[in-house]
Image (spheres, rainbow, N blue to C red):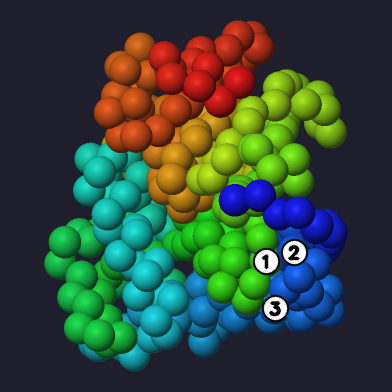
Amino acid sequence: MTVASTIDLTHAWSMMGGTARAWVVIDTETALPGELIVALVESRGRDLEQRWSRFIADSDLTRLTESQGNPVLVDDDTVTLLEAMRAGWRETDRDFDPTLLPAVIAEGYGRSMIDPARSTRLPESARSRGDLDAMRIEGTTVTLPRGTALDAGGIGKGLAADLIAADLIAAGAAGCLVEVGGDLRVCGTAPDSVAWRVAVDDPFVPGTERLQIRLPDGGIATSSQRKRRWMSEAGVERHHLIDPATRRSAISSIQTVTVIAATAARAEVLTKPGFLRDIDDYLEWIPTRGAAAMLIDAEGAEYTSTNWSDYA
């Protein structure tokens, strides 16, 4: 699609414990008002955080975690999230596991790093490694097995970027880039009418780029063990990427995993095995999932899948 006359609008706002931003290409013939864009993205972002945050007592995910196996009525968007969680859990052979919330809290991440007054409550029955195949979804009524606790985490940010981008296109935007907490979705016409340029940050020098990729449409997500770190009560440094096998912070030389996929939510899911599997095995597997990946280790070395150069 080529747009003869366009204007660009950028907007940033607080969302999901960080900063979200949108870059919108507006066709002057359809004239999507800038104030409508701002209202749309901020309202959508607030709604999704309200439904999915583990730090909000009446969010859909909190109510599911506390349901003790009883059915819970949730929003349509939450059903979309739950189905994406289960699909990712299956596709990665449980390397991506959104049922590890008790382990995350046991490692010391029970309070928000942005607002320590906000904390996560869990019922006594909560256990890590739930069975998502036993989750029942009937319309918007969800029954979660007793003891299963869910954390939207990165997939929530990726899916939020996907949903907000879809809303912008539906509202008349010619194209957009939406980023939520580092997970990005691009779609529609890019500013140069060819492809969106997306920077991959250098994990060792905050605020600098390691490289740029070109992406006409799709999602990109980076998971990092260098962020969201804290000291445990025993004085040991921990991070939020949990190894499902040990239920502890993953031990890996890999510092960041960046994945390009069809959506930001799927890209986020596919980053997780990069911290847990043999590097060569992971890089051979990722193209079979219709995705590309780059890993950076503790020495700064880069490892890429054979199809990564398609986006250079």
The residue that mark 1 highlights is: 173
Q: Secondary structure at mark 2?
A: strand
Q: Quadrant of residue 9?
A: bottom right
* Earlier residue among tags 3 and 2: 2
Say which amino acid is labelled 1: Ala
**Amino acid carrying mark 3 in the image:** Leu
Q: Gap in Å between the C-alphas at discs 3 and 2?
A: 17 Å
Asked whether, in this view, residue 227 is left or right of residue 260, the answer is right
Q: Is residue 259 left or right of residue 98?
A: right
Specify whether residue 6 is in view. Answer: yes
Secondary structure at numbered mark 3: helix
Locate the C terminus and report the quarter of the image it occupies: top right
**In x, y percent, where is residue 45?**
65, 73
Residue 242 can be seen, yes or no? no
Whether pointer 2 and pointer 1 mark residues with C-beta atoms closer than 8 Å, the reply is yes
Q: Is residue 104 above or below residue 17?
A: above
Q: Position of residue 249 (x, y in %)?
A: 48, 37
Question: Which one is nearer the viewer's eye here, 179 or 50?
Answer: 179
- Which of the 4 image quadrants contains residue 307? top left
| Residue on which the image places disc 3 | 40
Q: Which mark is residue 27?
A: 2
**Which residue occupies 83% across, 74% down?**
34
Residue at screen point 73% across, 21% down: 210
Q: Does 111 appear above or below 129?
A: below
SS for callout 1: loop
Distance of label 2 from label 1 (alpha carbons) = 7 Å
Query: Count of labels shown?
Result: 3
Q: Report crowding for label 3: few under 14, some 14 to 19, many 20 or more residues within 10 A (C-alpha).
A: some
Residue that appears at 39% across and 81% down: 76
Q: Dot 1, crowdedness within 10 Å: few (<14), some or many (≥20)?
A: many
Q: Of residues 135 and 45, which is closer to you in this image?
A: 45
Q: Earlier in the sequence, mark 2 or mark 1?
A: 2
